[in-house]
Image (cartoon, rainbow, N blue to C red):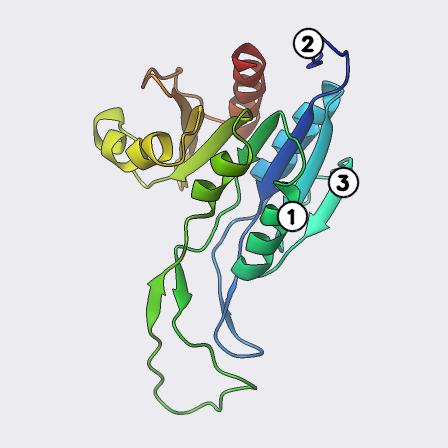
């Protein structure tokens, strides 16, 4: 794979990858989370590391067995912890930001202190969470920004309205549109001009295509 080096200074690219699930606390013991394994983030980190890039990986409570040795690894567990880490990292200069974490869409309006007792009905009020991807461009105006959109159906005609905000509001350069079900994995990359790549049927194929397209976009 071709080396991703900044031609003017010959210094390695600085790449930030977010990966894995976030959790939203119900009380001090219970959480609401999602099924993200973190495999995609580690595959992306490893692919960029092979190019000679410096990779900072912000990683949730992953279950993948894919090994990774990023330049810097910072762990989070909750949505709030990722929010804090991302703010800190965006004060650094990154050439590429890959926001692949499966971030909670909802948070509890009020979480409970201590541990709730069992055996009684419990009503939880959820409110929309702040979209962390919308915070990236303001602090990284020159970065190449890649967002992710996971949907049960990724037909291009159906997905276009759903990814519009990632281009119009988050100002992403590219968006990975993907799904995973009993039939396997499928994904393609949509560009800011709304052109799309060919559909791929494996995470490794997607990652190889993504790194190549990032190189073209720099």
State the SS at label 1: helix
Residue at 53%, 75% in the rendered image: 30
Residue at 61%, 30% in the rendered image: 44
Q: Quadrant of residue 189?
A: top left
Q: Quadrant of residue 39?
A: top right
Q: How many marks?
A: 3
- Near mark 1 (Cα within 10 A), the count class, few <14, some 14-19 or many ≥20, is few
State the SS at label 3: strand
The quarter of the image holding the N terminus is top right
Which of pointers 3 and 2 indicates the residue nearer the eye? 3
- Near mark 2 (Cα within 10 A), the count class, few <14, some 14-19 or many ≥20, is few
State the SS at label 2: loop
Residue at 39%, 37% in the rendered image: 149
Can you give x and y, in whole percent of width and height, for residue 173 in the image?
44, 23
Give whichever of discs 3 and 2 has the lower sequence position.
Answer: 2
Can you give x and y, in whole percent of width and height, for residue 154 in the image?
31, 32
Label 3 to label 2: alpha-carbon separation:
22 Å
- Residue 88: image tag: 1
- Residue 170: image tag: none
Label 3 to label 1: alpha-carbon separation:
13 Å
Proximity of marks 1 and 2: CB atoms separated by less than 8 Å: no
Residue topped by disc 2: 2
- Residue 72: image tag: 3
Say whether residue 37 is left or right of residue 130.
right
Residue at 54%, 10% in the rendered image: 216
Give whichever of discs 1 and 2 has the lower sequence position.
Answer: 2
The quarter of the image holding the C terminus is top right
**Above or below: residue 83 compared with residue 17:** below
**Above or below: residue 105 compared with residue 72:** below
Say whether residue 47 is left or right of residue 174.
right
């Amino acid at each position: 794979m071709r080396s991703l080096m900044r031609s003017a200074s010959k210094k390695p690219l600085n790449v930030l990858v977010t990966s894995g699930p976030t959790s939203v606390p119900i009380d001090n013991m219970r959480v609401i989370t999602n099924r993200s394994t973190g495999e995609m983030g580690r595959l992306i980190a490893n692919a960029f590391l092979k190019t000679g890039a410096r990779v900072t990986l912000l990683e949730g409570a992953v279950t993948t067995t894919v090994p990774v040795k990023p330049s810097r690894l910072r762990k989070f567990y909750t949505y709030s912890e990722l929010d804090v880490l991302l703010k800190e990292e965006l004060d650094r200069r990154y050439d590429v930001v890959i926001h692949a974490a499966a971030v909670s869409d909802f948070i509890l309006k009020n979480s409970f202190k201590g541990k709730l007792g069992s055996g009684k009905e419990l009503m939880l009020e959820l409110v929309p969470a702040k979209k962390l991807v919308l915070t990236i461009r303001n602090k990284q105006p020159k970065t190449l920004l890649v967002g992710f959109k996971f949907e049960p159906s990724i037909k291009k005609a159906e997905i276009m309205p759903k990814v519009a905000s990632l281009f119009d509001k988050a100002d992403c350069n590219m968006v990975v549109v993907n799904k995973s079900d009993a039939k396997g994995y499928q994904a393609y990359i949509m560009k800011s001009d709304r052109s799309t790549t060919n559909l791929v049927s494996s995470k490794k194929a997607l990652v190889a295509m993504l790194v190549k397209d990032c190189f073209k976009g720099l």
